[in-house]
Amino acid sequence: MVGLILAIFALYLHTLDKQSLVFEEGLSVVFSNRTVPQLMHTLVYEDLHPPLHYLLLHFWMSLAGNGERAVRMPSAMAALLMVPLAWAIVMEVWGQGKDEPRSGARALTALGAAALVGASPFVAYHAQETRMYSLVAALSLAAVWAFLRATRTGGRSWWLAFSCLLAASLYTQYLAFFVVPAILLYALLLDRESLRTTALCTLLAGLLYLPWIVPAYLQLKRLFRWPDYWVTTRIDPSLFLYTISDTLLPSYTMRWQVLVAALGALLLIRFALRSRFRLSRTQRRGLLIVLVFAMQLALTFVTVSLAPKFVARYTIVAAAPFYIFVALALYAVLGARSLAGRALFGVLVVIAVLVSLRSTVAVLAGRHDPRDDTRGVAAYLTENARANDALLLVENAPYAFQYYYGGAAPWHGLHVGQGFAGAADVLNSILRTQPRRVWLVLWHQEFADPTDMIVTELVRVGREVNIGRQFFGYQLRAFDIYDYETPIVALPQPKNVLNADFWPGIRLLGFDHLTPETGQLHYALYWEAQKALHRNYSLALSWQDQEGNEYLHQDQALSTHYFLPPVWPLNTPIRGRVDVVLPADLPPLTYRVYLRVLDPESQRDVDLVDASGIPLGQALLLEELFLPKSMVEKAPVEVPNLLHVDMANDLQLLGFGLDRSEYYPGDDLRLVVWWHRPDISSAGQVQGTPDRDQSVTFRLLDGGNSVIWEVERPIVPGYPSAEWQSGEVNRIIYRLTIPSDLTAGDYSLQASMGERWGLLAVLHIVAREHRYDVPLMQHSLNVQFEEGITLLGYDLGAPTVQVCETMTITLHWQATDPITTSYK
């Protein structure tokens, strides 16, 4: 046992300072560095945890200093303490009764439980974290051990130790409260003799906790007034269970232990049924471990369902009881009283420990579940940020950052949330100092700045610089500021006012163009919820040419993917920024920009409505916008079907794209062609003149290479190829209509310019089935349109339809004369 403890201690110590302190650790260090009165005031009015961890760290740092190894050592020692405690609990569960196994079997099982706890990556992770989680787990485990010993011996000193340890765990972390119902339930159902003493000692622990009742109330009151979670969030039970299993069982091999534990539980239930629930004292005491584990998980889930913020560390008190239960269940299943059973037990535990250690080493080395690289980002800014720059930390969580940062640039912390006015004041105060560059350090942006206000406003007054470095857990961005005069406004009025209403109460107030940059286009959209919204609506932006061909498309949340419409405050402008990448092959055209709002449940676009709620369509025309070639990004172009066919001295057909290769007569064919102008210096004399658009002819050839159809189109309307720059690539969409009288078969699709041509693809034309009988229909109309088109009638998918439901209408048409044009 001593060797096991020393080995685990060496493992913890070896990597104690390998990874950076994270925010919560920096908070522990900064808070604990204060005087005790200042520390207590800080905890009550700024923190959400009891004081014991901070007080112990305060006195420890006064002796050991505040280096990374020093501040993490108390957590490592607390985690290490769980190893002998696991051994002691197994020994105490069996006690000295006549029905207990021999001392060798007890020691082997206890050693197995201790090894599983020591090899746990979950326990090891928090052993290297300057927080209270290792301490609360150790104190809770010690309280369970003292309780078991007190119920066996009846000694007053052990009952007093139980009360003190239980109170100490409550002074460390609030989630230790969940041990109390497990112990009371055990005494009520399985050990009635100890019920009175258990209740009195639990009451004594409560009396010891009385001095912290008022501060705890103030902390919780502040939490529910200003929650650090989204109130509309819901915890998915399946995700909760998956997180727990992935945390406690980091490998498939260890997950076999769950099967073993389940078999042990089934054996226990079977024995209980056969013995009419007359469990031995050892079996009843073993069930206490199961109750501690189960109650911790169950009550944690209830808590995070009411206050929906969950991370796996909230269940750390359940970790050691779980591994102890696994060891006890293994013993029960294998019948480890025999020599063969003990050997098999030992082999399985060794395999589980070795597999677990593999995950533990990866966790300690930072290869799995690495910590935020605060050390790295602070070192980078210390070296690269100038004195006339400004650092903006969003979230306002500077504790770990200031532990490492030693640069000359001043830093500012900012939490936006929905406090847009305060955020605008901070940004304006920074801009008044006229910083050369604002370095933006984003951490947990989904909560700190849910509408992405800071980035949007920095894009408005500056230009983003690509720094080419990122650090795990952080997003580092830099903006060179050029506009110090334009004030940041909390709720700006859009320059392009629209006041467009979408059902069921979403208003687009308008939009702004933010500073364009090469390769990107930025929009700031301003939304408003006219009434409470209950769905996570999103938007789709489409850039189309004058013929309706879509060259760009972007789907995204209305604001951000972490600030969804159900949490929007009513009648308050909400920012949403759209960053559009302009690909290098985008042709210089005038585009119509359309916006749609998508309902995720019905998977359809919601209606754009007028003031009376009457639908006006689903697409809103934002603007018509000319995008010059100078705005596109400078990046290689990806072409699906490369050809490299020289069509003229100054023009090359680079490649093409088709949606499919099988069509019906009369179908529209969407053909995408990439045109390339080679280097003029190597292309010789330029063919074509700037005042005339070159054109391309598309044609279909049958099996005998006879041209049966052709159509001529300008390459880029209004942009002669002689004006193209050397190396320029343009992606052009052509919409061609396949002749309606084309017979079935295979046809070659070619593109030609003069005498030069290139084969694009072979199209397979399928004969279209024609129907001449008039089917039965629900509603007859016989409405005559021009060119021999008759609407015979229609069918409705359902006689009634609810709001937001899809309504299906089937129209029946008939052609009384030959039709030469395709209509919509």
Image (cartoon, rainbow, N blue to C red):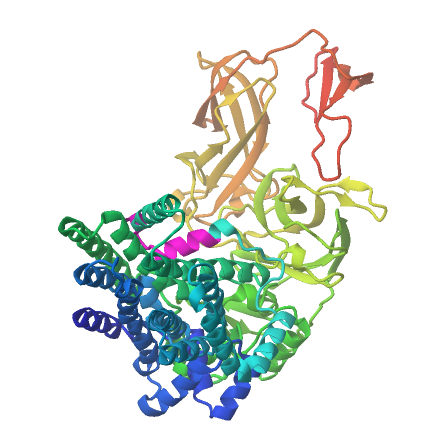
- The image shows residue 641 at horizontal and vertical percentages of 41, 34
Q: Residue furthest top?
A: 773
Say left or right for 265 vs 175.
Answer: left
Pick the front one: 279 or 725: 279
- The image shows residue 539 at horizontal and vertical percentages of 63, 49
Residues shaded magenta: 240-256
Pick the front one: 158 or 428: 158
Pick the front one: 302 or 750: 302
In the picture, the quarter occupied by the C terminus is top right
Q: Can residue 433 be seen from the camera position used here? A: yes
The question of residue 311 being in magenta is answered with: no
Q: Is residue 329 above or below residue 13?
A: above
Residue placed at 73% from the left, 17% from the top? Answer: 813
Q: Main secondary structure of the magenta part?
A: helix
Q: Is residue 146 above or below residue 498?
A: below
Residue placed at 50% from the left, 61% from the top? Answer: 300
